[in-house]
Amino acid sequence: MISSNFKIFYFALCLGVISCNQNQSKKIPVISSKFQNLEVKKELEGMDIRSHLNKKVNLYNFSDKLQLINFFFVSCPTICPAMENELTPLAREYKEKDVIFLSFTINPESDDIESLNIHAKKIKSGQNRLFLRTNKNNIEKLASLYLAQIKNGEDKFFYHTSQVVLLDKSMKIRGLYDILNKDEVDLLEEDIEILLKN
C-alpha cells in the first residue's frame, strides 16, 4: 500500500513537472523587429547617447543581453520613485545574468550627466544599470521605436507611462509591462527567465 507521504511527494512532483512544462512551452510573441532594420541601426549608432558615467553608448553593444528599457526623469515627483522601487531590486536580482537595464531621461535639459550620476549613486545602481541622456529629438525617436508614450504637457511638465520594454538578444521587442502592476512584474520575470534559456 502506498503511504500518504509518498502520495503527497508524487503529487508535488507532478505539479512541478506541469509547471516547468508550461513555462517551457510558453511562446513569447515578437512585438517589433524595428531595431533590426539597417537604416534604424545606422541612425541609432549616429546618436550621441551618453551614460551617467559620461561614456558614449551604442545600443547595439548590448545585443548579447536582454534589455529592459524605461523612461523617467530625475526630478519626477509622481510615478518615477514608485517605478524605481520596482526596478532597483529587479536589476539587483539579475546582476549576474545577461540582462541590462537602460533608463532614458525625457528631460535632458535638467538631467545632465552629473545629475544622472548622482541619481545612480543614490539608488546604488549596479553595473547592469545605465541612466542615459540624449537630445529631445532623439528621445522622441527612441520612444517611438520602443513603443513608449512620452510627451511634454502644456503645463511645461513631462509625462511618461510606467511601462518597461523587454528586448531579446536579437534586439526584438518581446513585451511591454506596467512595472507598477504586480501581476505584470511577475509576468516580466517569467518572460525574462524563458528568454535567458533561449
Image (tube, rainbow, N blue to C red):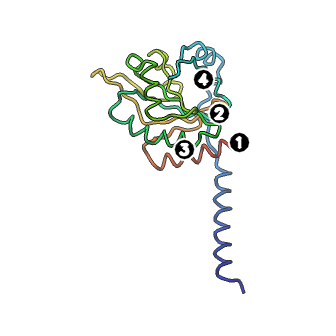
Q: Residue at x 48, y 39 (%)?
A: 87
Q: Which residue corresponds to mark 4? A: 59
Residue extending farthest to the bottom is 1
Decide: few, some or many residues near mark 4? Use Cα within 10 Å; few <14, some 14-19, many ≥20: some
The label shown at residue 71 is none
Q: Earlier in the sequence, mark 3 or mark 2?
A: 2
SS at mark 1?
Answer: loop
Q: Contact (CB < 8 A) between labels 4 and 3?
A: no
Residue 75 as seen in the image, left or right of residue 169: left
Q: Which residue corresponds to mark 3? A: 188
Q: Earlier in the sequence, mark 4 or mark 3?
A: 4
Residue 87 as seen in the image, left or right of residue 38: left
Q: Residue 35 in the image: x percent, y percent?
A: 61, 24
Query: Can you tell which quarter of the image residue 72 is in?
Result: top left
Alpha-carbon span between mark 4 and mark 2? 11 Å
Q: Residue at x 67, y 67 (%)?
A: 14
At label 2, the amino acid type is Lys
At label 1, the amino acid type is Asn
